Image: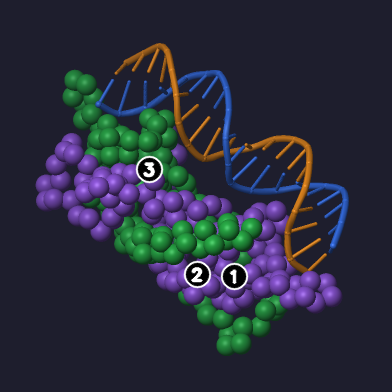
Chain colours: A green, B purple, C orange, D blue
Amino acid sequence: MGQGDAGVTIDPTRKAKSGGLPDRQPVWAYDPLCPVRDVLDRIGDKWSTLILCTLGAGPLRFSALQRVIPDISKRMLTQTLRDLERDGLVARTVFPTKPPSVEYRLTSLGVTILEPLGFLVQWADRSHAEIRQARLVFDAAS
Amino acid sequence: MGQGDAGVTIDPTRKAKSGGLPDRQPVWAYDPLCPVRDVLDRIGDKWSTLILCTLGAGPLRFSALQRVIPDISKRMLTQTLRDLERDGLVARTVFPTKPPSVEYRLTSLGVTILEPLGFLVQWADRSHAEIRQARLVFDAAS
DNA sequence: CAGAATCCTATGAGATACTG
DNA sequence: CAGTATCTCATAGGATTCTG
């Protein structure tokens, strides 16, 4: 990363100059501690997006989440919920009933990720056929 | 996959019914082999989004990518590029010069992911301060 | 230059059993 | 019910060395 511009974050809206000279200095400086990466790496695990999308439809209790996402282990569900709570995306509410029940819901911040996440999911949905096809072609050629 | 409603994919645009009854049947059926997850899990690794955003500004050679992303190892750069190529998001062109040079560029499909990815990056950029703050609060309370 | 091959370690994540 | 505590294994991913 250069001087002056050190630590600039990811900016995918940045356009290449026409002609796109290949080997110049980086279009955007890169910072290993980039806050965008810090946040995205957390979301990029196996379960976070799935849980966020699920809670996007409304609050659910622990066991209900397990039923909706049958192939997650209690351990990972607990851990992922904790991480999301720590990041302020999910709120955890304990109801002191006889057998305790705990409700998870998106925070107001958590709700705001639904839209960008939704665009990505839509893209994946629209593109997965083309991607699968590309994989077939690639694997056949290798 | 599936007949009828089985295997319905992720749909974050789905809204909860008003009142949001907590413990009903899942709002959307969940499929471990969901194509959306299949695609997103691939993008969700440590380097894919970074490389896609970088190439979004224009094609780059292998060594140039390494300079832009200094903390990636050759091994992971090669592997991630291969995976992206396999998925049809990146095209690899070899120029038979004396020391061989290889150019990587987004395919037309690859370009289409820039927009949804950009929204997520923008969200991360706007939210990282709030997230960091939430982490401080959470860690102080624990 | 652009990798391929190999080695090694840290972590992600499942399975199971226990608890308030 | 909603976890916690272990144990274990598979994989992601870094460092290093070799090659056309």
Q: Chain of mark 2?
A: B
Crowding at mark 1 (Cα within 10 Å: few <14, some 14-19, many 20+): some
Q: Position of residue B84 (x, y in %)?
A: 56, 61
Tag 2 near tag 1, CB within 8 Å: yes
Numbered tag placed on residue B110 in the rendering:
2
Q: Earlier in the sequence, mark 1 or mark 3?
A: 3
Measured in 3D between alpha carbons, the distance from the residue under mark 2 to the one under mark 3, in whole angstroms, is 25 Å
In this figure, which residue is indicated by the disc labeled 3?
B32
Q: SS of the residue at dot 1?
A: strand
* C-alpha gap between disc 2 and disc 1: 9 Å
Task: Give above or below for B11 relative to B23.
Answer: below
Helix, strand or loop under label 2: helix
The residue at 44%/72% (across/down) is B112
Q: Which residue is mark 1?
A: B91
| Residue A136, x across and y down, in percent | 52, 58
Residue A10 appears in the picture as rendered? no
Dividing the picture into quarters, in which one does residue D19 lie? bottom right
Which circle marks residue B83 in the picture?
Answer: none
* Mark 2 touches mark 3? (CB < 8 Å): no
Helix, strand or loop under label 3: loop
In percent of width and height, residue A114 lies at: 31, 57
Task: Give coordinates of residue A40: x percent, y percent.
Answer: 48, 55
Binning the other alpha carbons within 10 Å of mark 3 as few (below 14), some (14 to 19) or many (20 upward) gives few
Inspect the image, locate mark 2, and give the three-letter code of the amino acid beneath it.
Gly
Taking the spot 73% from the left edge, 67% from the top edge, the residue there is B63
Q: Amino acid at mark 3?
A: Pro
Return the residue found at the far bottom: A18
